[in-house]
Structure formats: C-alpha cells, structure tokens
Image: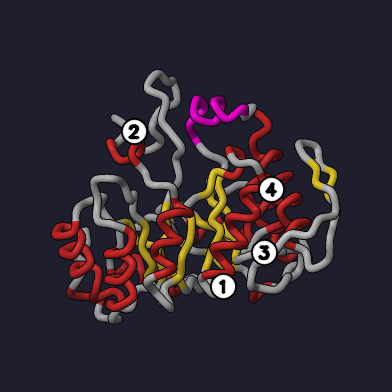
Amino acid sequence: MRIAVTIFLTDETITPVRLARELEQRGFAGLYLPEHTHIPVERTSPYPAGGELPREYGRTLDPFVALGQAAAVTGRLGLGTGITLAAQHDPIDLAKQIATLDHLSGGRFTLGLGFGWNVEEAADHGVRWRTRRELVRDRMGLMRALWAEEPTAYEGEFGSVRASLAHPKPVQKPRGPVVGPRTLVGGAAGPKLFAHICEYADGWLPIGGRGLTESLPALRTAWADAGRDPGALQVVPYAVRPSAGKLAHFADLGIEEVVVQLPPEGEAEMLRALDAFQPFVDGEAGGAEEGAR
C-alpha cells in the first residue's frame, strides 16, 4: 500500500522544500496540501470537526506555489491538493495553474477537488452556497475544454470559454469522460457526490475513511451504472490517523493508497512524526501503531 501524507503547511511550519525532500528520501508516495484563501473572523460556519477552528486554517500556504517548490526538488514524489476549492477560482486561471504544475512535475499532480464548508469564505469569492456543487461541476467542464488536445469551446451555466490555444496540457491522456490530471473528489458519501465522481473524476477522497465497508458498494454500483471501467475506480482515504488494523482493513477493501495526517509543526517535530509513520511505509506497521496515534 502506498502511504502519502497531508499537512497544513503554514508560515510557521517546516518548509515545502525540506518536507518534500524528506518524504521522497523516506519512500513516501506523495504530499497533498489543503487550501483556504482566508478565514473570515466573523463567521457562522462551524468547524466540521467540532470545537474551535485550529490556528493553521488561517495561515495555510497557497498549495500550488508550495507544490511547485516541492516538485522542483523531487523526482518521484506525488503532488496533490487535498482539496482545491474550485468554486473559489477563476477556472481559466486554475486550468493553467494545474496544467503547468502537472507538466513541470512530469505528470505527478493529483487534483483533489472539494466543495468547501466555510460559507463566509466562499461568499467573499462570490459563490452562492446552494449552487456551489453545480458550479464546481461546470468549472470542471470548462477546464476539460481547455485541456482537450484540440481547441474546444465550452458553454456552461456559470461560465464559458471560446475554442482556444491553451498549453501546456496535463500529462495524463483522457480516460473515459475524464480529461486532465488524476482527479479525486472529496466529500461525504451519497448519491450526489457519487454522481459527480462518476461524471468527471477518477475516484473519491473520503475524509478519515470511516464507513467505507457500507459506502463503497454504492459507489461501485454508481460507477458501473455510469459505464466506467470497474478496475479504474480509485478510493484514497484522506487525513487518516493510521493503525496497523486500519490499513489492513483498507487493503481488504482493495484500497491501494492512503493519505495520513501530519501535524502542522516545525522541522524537529515533523521529523519525529515521520519517524513514527516510517514503519507503515516500510511495511512493518505492527510496531508503529502506538507511535503514530
């Protein structure tokens, strides 16, 4: 099983360059970074995990800039967003950022997409909360048009683009309805989410990975009903607190990659956290369970 990591990189943590080099040297599969442009101080949106919103949410580095640094100092490490808040971006600009990062990294980029939880943050970007899911769907359609091999126009509910010259192109070739880099959609299990995944993505980024025994059959049914290749579906549990038993359970479900959560710390603390996770990477997870909690 491939073990990747996610972390809230901030102006107070280990740097992207230092972390990326360490991850590649240790054999980790990838680095996924979250996104928040800003956190309005006055908000009614509750923190999804409950309690006070952690300090790092308001201090996150831009994931594309940070991943560009990581790409420049590594050759094998996967690079991903976990997640990109696509509704909060101009899709023409976002398509260029994604394609450029994927091109310069040699096709190592994974686009993790999400719909967000912070109503006030989205509102400052002009996003109407009720329509954010359809807005993301529409923006993916526009970006797919820009990533197409031939100039392709797109006319959607929320945006449009003329048939255009738009390079570079993402490295990975189209597969089924999916155009662009490896694309995974985050969110809670349900018919609406699964419909989005089947329409324009390669798979699912379920936070924490709980309940997969019950939800995976429903996703696989929706995937088959959409005419997608059953062997192509990717499910990548995200922000996981790992244990040997949990990873074994994921493996039994056919999962091949897991993204574990690192704390938003400085270099010394981060190296200790990576030491605790190292046995999972080396396939010796039994003795690491206590240290990785």
Crowd band around label 4 with a 10 angstrom C-alpha radius: few (<14), some (14–19), many (20+): some
Q: Which of the numbered marks, if any, corresponds to residue 50?
A: 2
Q: CA distance from mark 2 to mark 1?
A: 37 Å
Query: What residue is pinned by disc 3?
Result: 180
Q: Residue at x 24, y 68 (%)?
A: 277
- Give the secondary structure at mark 4: helix
Q: CA distance from mark 2 to mark 3?
A: 35 Å
Q: Is residue 135 above or below residue 289?
A: above
Mark 3 or mark 1: whose residue is earlier in sequence: 1
In front: mark 4 or mark 1? 4
Q: Which of the numbered marks, if any, corresponds to residue 107?
A: 1
**Label 4 sits on what residue type?**
Ile
Crowd band around label 3 with a 10 angstrom C-alpha radius: few (<14), some (14–19), many (20+): many
Q: Quadrant of residue 38?
A: top left
Mark 4 touches mark 3? (CB < 8 Å): no
Crowd band around label 2 with a 10 angstrom C-alpha radius: few (<14), some (14–19), many (20+): few
Q: Is residue 94 above or below residue 51?
A: below
Q: CA distance from mark 4 to mark 3?
A: 14 Å
Mark 4 or mark 1: whose residue is earlier in sequence: 4
Point out residue 225 in the picture as x, y percentages from the top left corner: 76, 62
- Give the secondary structure at mark 1: loop
